[in-house]
Image: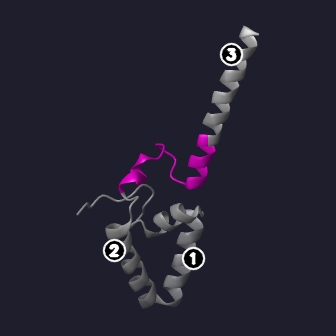
């Protein structure tokens, strides 16, 4: 068993894992869980525990979660960073072709 928590996890990484999988905002998902916890406490705890176990044993990306860009815990920021890097690469290519032509 690996006791390490995935990137962006506060407790067991359930909300962070769901948010990453569906590209949702993790804080909105956490707020919804807190609301569910306030209304149906036992059900919320049981669902969270079941999802934590499922993610722990069956999530194929569990080890890959730590491979995101350091300091970028949300999927939105990671995707934006990747788009910016791609635009910078294209800009450098354009600059290089202007110097030669």
* Nearer mark to the viewer, of 3 and 1: 3
User: Which residue: 50% across, 52% down?
Assistant: 73
The first of marks 2 and 3 along the sequence is 2
Decide which of 71, 80 is in the foreground and name it: 80
The image shows residue 28, relative to residue 80, as above or below, that is below
Q: Earlier in the sequence, mark 3 or mark 1?
A: 1
Say left or right for 100 vs 51: right
Residue 47 is situated, as x and y percent measured from the top left of the image, at 43, 83
Q: Which mark is residue 32?
A: 1
Q: Which residue is mark 3?
A: 96
Q: Name the element at disc 2.
A: helix
Expressed as whole percent of the image width and height from the top left, the position of residue 14 reads: 44, 69
The one nearer the camera, 54 or 12, is 54
Decide: is 89 above or below 2.
above
Counting residues from the start of the chain, the first of labels 1 and 2 encountered is 1
> Looking at the magenta stretch, what is its main secondary structure?
helix
10 Å crowding of disc 1: few (<14), some (14-19), many (20+)? few
Range of magenta residues:
63-82
Q: Which residue is mark 2?
A: 53
Residue found 72% across the figure and 16% down from its top: 97
Task: Say which quarter of the image contains residue 50.
Answer: bottom left
């Amino acid at each position: 068993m690996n006791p390490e928590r995935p990137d962006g996890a506060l407790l067991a990484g359930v909300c962070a894992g769901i948010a990453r999988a569906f590209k949702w905002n993790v804080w909105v998902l956490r707020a919804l869980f807190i609301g569910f916890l306030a209304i149906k406490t036992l059900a919320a705890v049981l669902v969270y525990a079941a999802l934590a176990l499922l993610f722990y044993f069956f999530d194929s990306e569990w080890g890959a979660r730590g491979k995101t860009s350091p300091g970028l815990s949300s999927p939105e920021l990671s995707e934006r960073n990747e788009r910016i890097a791609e635009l910078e690469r294209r800009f450098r290519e354009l600059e290089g072709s202007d110097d030669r032509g």
